[in-house]
Amino acid sequence: MPSVTEVMTKPAREICFSDFETLISLEAPESDTLELKADLSIQKDVQGWRAKRELHKQETRSLAKEIVALSNTYGGRIFVGIVESKDMPKRAFTLGVPLPNIHDLVERLRDSLSALIEPPIPALAIVPIVVNSAASEGFFVIDVPRSQASPHGYGSPPECYWRRDSSSRPMSIADLHNSFWEARTRRERIDGEISAAETRLARMAESTTDTFAFRISIISEEVLEIRDLVRGLRSGDVYTNLEHSYLGIVTHPMYAMHDWQFSFFGATKTENTFEPRGRAVWTIDETGVVELTGYFFPAEPTTEIILDIEAICGSTAHALRLAAAVGRYSKGARPERWVVSVEFCNQYRKVSVKDPVSFKTTAPVPFRGNAKLRPLIFDFSQSPDTTFETLEEKIWAAFGQPTVTARRYKAALG
């Protein structure tokens, strides 16, 4: 049987009825990331979705309160359809009564919550769980990400909550001030790290000609303190298993640990690439930045540079796994959220990519100069594999290619 952690971290779109049964079998307690509800909350003398197939404002507001509280804290999930026990903390006890017209209900909730919550919460997902297809009855799960845009509120004027243990509590003025300050400081630091990474790639491109340059930057939302980084890398204290595809631009960064070298900011590791020919450098900043930068060049002055997009996705997965491993080694709390920034710089006239269906054919890269992907937030406590699939799609799209299921990289980040 899966654990509560496995249920909470599996991709949102893969949540199913058996996950409800698992939480009940394990008597899962409510926590700062898990909220259980037997039904839509409404007063007994008020008619809502069950009676009129129309959402009452009480039903929407009660969910909005829990959503903003989770998003303002660590993120989490709300399972609607599980009756709680009466002890404290409340635990998953039994199944509730299925809700009618579950797909219509979910669509109405999406619209209502989007209008009610301010500012909107990116990547908020509501997943219907059908238990009686003939009657269109079922339950639903709300997957709530921790938001960089916090604090969030609901209603007018907005009411702000955050999660404390298993309850949602109002945020005081001091709490709001601190939240705004922390969010601003976090954004400014991340923006600064991305700007510095862009500058490093620009300088690399200036120092080389007729090349295709790239960078993959993974930035911790929180400032880390990673002492004795190189010693830990070389001794294997910083460890990430290799039980997945090795395919990448270069070998997995933990494949030869003795290659890591000291630097004034942390650790570096330099490697040559062979198909296509090039050079790449892994760097780890002890404050919480993992980066792979490099460039490819033609074997001969007139030959083509042929890229393998799957290898680029592979190295992105390697960088994420390395970030998670480094995060576990840091002093203090284990960081869960990382920002991924990817950029390419094409300054050679003949650069192509392998066809995702048949590697015997190629297609020209559809851009010259720089192509930047909008940064994505990876939360290793909540559905990182789902986010990686989105990143994969963006990388393939940058090269003008569709994402073919058979060519997806099996990252296994969760």
Image (cartoon, rainbow, N blue to C red):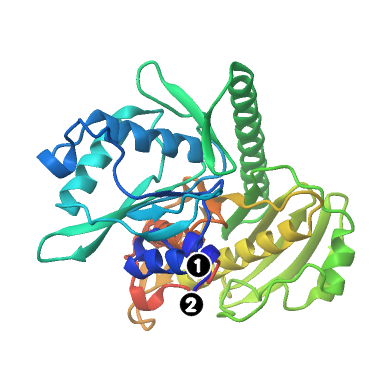
Image spot of residue 208 (x, y percent): 65, 56
- Residue sitting at x 44%, y 22%: 159
Q: Answer left or right for 291 relative to 43.
A: right
Residue type at mark 2 is Met
What residue is disc 2 on? 1
Report whether residue 391 is seen.
yes
* Residue 204: x %, y % from top left: 67, 52
Judging by the rendered image, the residue that carries numbered circle 1 is 26
Inspect this view and state whether residue 148 appears.
no
Q: Give the quadrant of residue 398.
A: bottom left
Which residue is located at x 60 percent, y 49 percent? 337
Quadrant in which residue 231 is drawn = bottom right
Q: Is residue 35 above or below residue 296?
A: above
Q: Nearer the viewer, residue 119 or 394?
A: 119
Residue placed most toward the observer, 189 or 1:
1
Mark linked to residue 409:
none
Q: Residues within 10 Å of mark 1 (few under 14, many from 20)?
A: some
Image height of 27 relative to 50, above or below: below
Q: Nearer the viewer, residue 155 or 168?
A: 168
Tell me the amino acid under the disc marked 1. Leu
Residue 394 image-quadrant placement: bottom left
Residue farthest to the front?
86
Task: Provide residue 173's location: percent of width, then percent of height.
Answer: 59, 16
